[in-house]
Amino acid sequence: MHRAVCPGSFDPVTNGHLDIIGRSAKLFDEVVVAVGVNKSKNRLFSPEERIAMLTEACAPWDNVRVDGFTGLLTDFCLEQDIDAIVKGLRAVTDFDYELQMAQMNSSLAPVVETVFVPTSPEWSFLASSLVKEVATFGGDVTGLVPEFVREHLLKRLAERESAGD
């Protein structure tokens, strides 16, 4: 059985993420969507919220499961018997960064390969940070994230606004 991981912060999950996850689900027997939990980073959604949203968003794929992880991704891969790390690439700048990460990961866990999947053109501009920024300033993010994620995002931003954040 070939298992892959699609790691990320997913704050929030976008349709670009789901494109890579869905395409990975066709290539591997099992795909683990791994939500990085870093308590020192200030995220809009908690790890539990991000895992819940991803679990709902990934429901169409029987061979995809969602989990959280802390520490090194390579350690998570070795613990979970994962063969490959799947990384979506939007542009050359992503490649520069991801190649360096892949080489570091290879030095830490030579049995784990990194697979680069080019983002579909319709999502090549999409990033969670841009979605949050657009939504914060009242822009419409319909079609960029699943509808239920958009609703969670708007609710969270309204909560922050009313709290004075």
Image: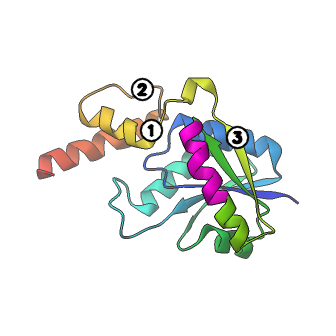
Q: Which of marks 3 and 2 is in front?
A: 3
Picture coordinates of residue 152 (x, y %)? 37, 43
The stretch drawn in magenta includes residue 101: yes
Q: How far apart are marks 2 and 1 (CA)?
A: 10 Å
- According to the picture, the residue beneath numbered tag 3 turns out to be 117
Q: Main secondary structure of the magenta part?
A: helix
Which element is circle 2 on? Answer: loop
Residue at 43% x, 50% y is: 11
Picture coordinates of residue 96 (x, y %)? 59, 47
Q: How far apart are marks 3 and 1 (CA)?
A: 26 Å
Above or below, 112 against 91 in this view is below
At label 3, counting other C-alpha atoms closer than 10 Å, the crowd grade (few under 14, some 14-19, many 20 or more) is: some
The stretch drawn in magenta includes residue 19: no
Type of amino acid at the residue the image marks with label 2:
Thr
Type of amino acid at the residue the image marks with label 3:
Val
Q: Nearer the N terminus, badge 3 or badge 1?
A: 3
Q: Nearer the viewer, residue 110 or 25?
A: 110
Residue at 43% x, 68% y is: 38
Residue at 63% x, 34% y is: 119
Picture coordinates of residue 9 (x, y %)? 49, 55
Residue range highlighted in magenta: 92-102
Above or below, 125 against 104 in this view is above
- According to the picture, the residue beneath numbered tag 1 turns out to be 148
Which element is circle 1 on? Answer: helix
Q: How far apart are marks 3 and 2 (CA)?
A: 24 Å
Residue at 65% x, 65% y is: 104
Type of amino acid at the residue the image marks with label 1:
Phe
Q: Is residue 84 visible?
A: yes
Which element is circle 3 on? Answer: strand
Q: Can residue 59 be seen in this view?
A: no
- According to the picture, the residue beneath numbered tag 2 turns out to be 142
Q: Nearer the N terminus, badge 3 or badge 2?
A: 3
